[in-house]
Amino acid sequence: MHKCATYYSVVLCLLLGATASLRAGDELPSKVLKPSGGVESISLGADGRWLVTGCKEDTRLWDLKADDPSAKSIVVRGSAGPVSPDDRWLMTAGNDRTIRLWDLKADDPSAEGREVARYEADWEPVRGVAISPNNRWLVTVGGDRAHGLQFRQPLAGHGRG
Amino acid sequence: MDFSSDSRWLVTGGDDGLTRLYDLKATDPGSKPLVLGGHTKGESVGEVRFTPNGRWLVTGGRDQTARRWDLRTIEDSPRSEVLRGHTSWVEFLAVSPNSRWLVTAASAFGDFDRAVRLWDLEAVDPTAVRAVLGGHGGSLQDAIFSPDGRWLVSRTSDKIVRLWDLKATKK
């Protein structure tokens, strides 16, 4: 019995020691972003201002330049797709069969989502979207098809391209 | 695998515990890689990453360690500093755009080491963990640094996103 107790206290000490060494370093303060449906993807827009979180049809933008970015979020329509290679445009695909672009350089990107494509009635829901590195093609896949669209950035003259 | 930002090196991590650097400026880059031992032999090196500034190579392995390699001396005397603390396979590495911060996370398999660790690659002692990012209820899926150096954004398998204030790290 006595031997056993010593053994356990040694194990306990070792465990406590291990825990203490795990805790070395600073504890960093953190803020939690927890929209009700959770988050399954994150991406960052141009200049690092807008953080995009997405989960199914819930796409939100959080202002990383705000004092407390977790305090509020802006909702945009559709499910979050990729951000364009120049980090400017966020693409979403909506249940209303439209693909929209949102300007991540704007003060309020949700103010005006620009519809860039409307898919045909026989399309399956969009499952994946990608933008080519040269900003030229926007490709969507849904059902058994892939669609390539010429990717023309809206608002020519307001930015690159 | 990863390419260095100057396209000089390609790095691969092997299941044999060895890290191989291929000199892409050589006539036949595939023939004679520089072999880096250090991680435990036979324990796979799953994560390899160059820092954007071309100064460091960082690796993470099944031997529960991450390592920092100095690219300036790597050809003559390859040597690494060992970043210890994880209690499971290191299977996630991310480096900040300014090349200063390294984030490591361990595999959630068969273990409860969900703490994400932050290391300062430019510190006098890079092997001293700078911060332990605790409270995660799942394994790390994504880590993004904001370009202004203020935030580290983590996304975990429990669908929660956390913003970590890097300004709060002590100098």
Image: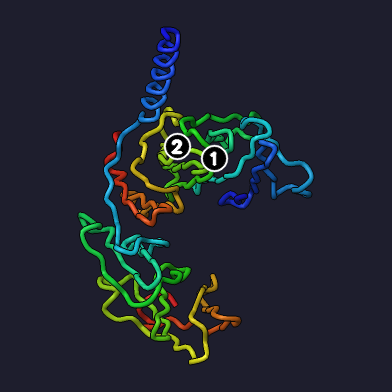
Query: Mark 1 vs mark 2: which is more N-terminal?
Result: 1
User: Around disc 2, counting alpha carbons within 10 Å, would you say few (fewer than 14), some (14 to 19), or many (20 or more)?
Assistant: many
Q: Which quarter of the rendered picture does the N terminus of chain A lie within? A: top left
Nearer to me, A4 or B166: A4
* Amino acid on which disc 2 is placed: Leu
Q: CA distance from mark 1 to mark 2?
A: 10 Å
Q: Position of residue B26 (x, y in %)?
A: 74, 47
Residue B7 percent across, percent down from the top left: 62, 52
* The C terminus of chain A lies in quadrant: bottom left
Q: Kindly identify which chain the residue marked by label 2 belongs to.
A: B
The residue carrying mark 2 is B121
Is residue A89 at least partly visible in the picture? no
Amino acid at dot 1: Val
Q: Is B153 drawn above or below residue A37 in the view shown?
A: above
Residue that sits furthest to the bottom in the current view: A121
The residue positioned 63% from the left and 30% from the top of the image is: B40
Left or right: A146, with A49 as reference point: right
**Label 2 near label 1: C-beta < 8 Å?**
yes
x%, y% of residue A50? 32, 64
User: Chain under label 1?
Assistant: B
A119 or B170: which is nearer to us? Answer: A119
Which residue is denoted by mark 1 in the rendering?
B58
